[in-house]
Image: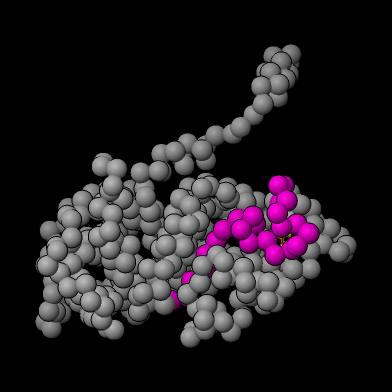
Amino acid sequence: MKANHRRQSTYTGEAMSSYRMPASNSNANPKPSKKNVIHIGGLPIEFPYQPYGSQLAYMGRVIATLDRAQRDGHFHALLESPTGTGKSLSLLCSVLAWQKNHRSKPQYGNISHSKPDPEALVDPLGHGGGFVPEMEPSGNLMPTLSESNNTKQNKTRGPIIYYATRTHSQISQVISEFRKTNYHVPMAVLASRKRYCTNAKVRGQDNIDETCKLLLKERGQKKVGCPEFGNANKIRSHPSLKKGGCYEVHDIEDLLKVGEMVEGCSYFGAQAMAEVAEIVFCPYSYIINPQIRKAMDISVKGNIIILDEAHNIEDIAREAGSIDAEEGVLIHGIRKSLSK
Ligand code: SF4
């Protein structure tokens, strides 16, 4: 893979297909449009600009992947494109359009947009498109505000989009693209305590995870604990995060501001929002690390998993399966086992 190419994976199961997006068509019209509806495979997709040919092709692959996953129960694709070709926007618009269409079907059982729309003006690939098939997790096992079951949620919410990136700054970039779309579905941004803690006495500490866990333990023993934890639910219900609010589409800094306004914990506030979100942005580790996934109640099954910059996945998976241990501790452990 060339260094200036970015790769994204849309994981919906085990099978795999790959596609490399061509460089953008310089003749395409980059002017923004309020509501520019294109049709791919009969599925209407609202796109904020006149799309490049390469963007149409990319969206066609995304739709074909999701259709195939829906049909076979699982599927995934590797999609690659040069930097600056509008890949994130194409991905977001197509996957959100597919999700919207899927939700509009009774019991989410049949997403048949399989008959091409006769009014389709643009369908570059035809139906199916000839498609062949900074890590800083909290890593905690603390309870969330309400214990929920993701499988149950799927039945009521349909497939949830999990958009995972390597760093928090990449999350902000993707959210700025999400802001451009017409699909402002309920969202959440998961991040670490280091990013989100609003307790002035704890924020900035090196061992913030441990301190927080101790405080919440104290709370259980009816000691002082962390007062911000008790106000975390005020974040989810804050008007600025509702439809039409200034933070309806928000990033980590925005949610932190809301937390500070209501003196509530943005870390647990974000988790509460994730329980009702239709798109959840998070660092890789929340998807790759099974412990964090379990703690955050994230289920891969039945959901749409997008891994941005997916060439990093090998390293992240290796990290998730590794531990750091000092030599002395290792030697002590080995001696102990040998002496048994
Ligand atoms: S509950 Fe939230 S605000 Fe309180 S210490 Fe933990 S992370 Fe910080």
Residue 84: percent from the left, percent from the top?
28, 59
The answer to if 194 sits in the magenta stretch is yes
Residue 215: percent from the left, percent from the top?
80, 57
Residue at image position (46%, 63%) is 172
The way the protein has been coloured in the rendering is: one colour
**In this picture, residue 16 sits left or right of residue 262:** left
Does 275 sit above or below residue 23?
Answer: below
The answer to if 323 sits in the magenta stretch is no
Q: Which quadrant does the N terminus fall into? A: top left
**In this picture, residue 229 sits left or right of residue 150:** right
Residue 13: percent from the left, percent from the top?
35, 52
The quarter of the displayed image where residue 235 is located: bottom right
Front position in the image: 177 or 315: 177
Q: Which quadrant does the C terminus fall into? A: top right
In this picture, which residue range is highlighted in magenta? 185-208
Residue at image position (71%, 21%) is 328
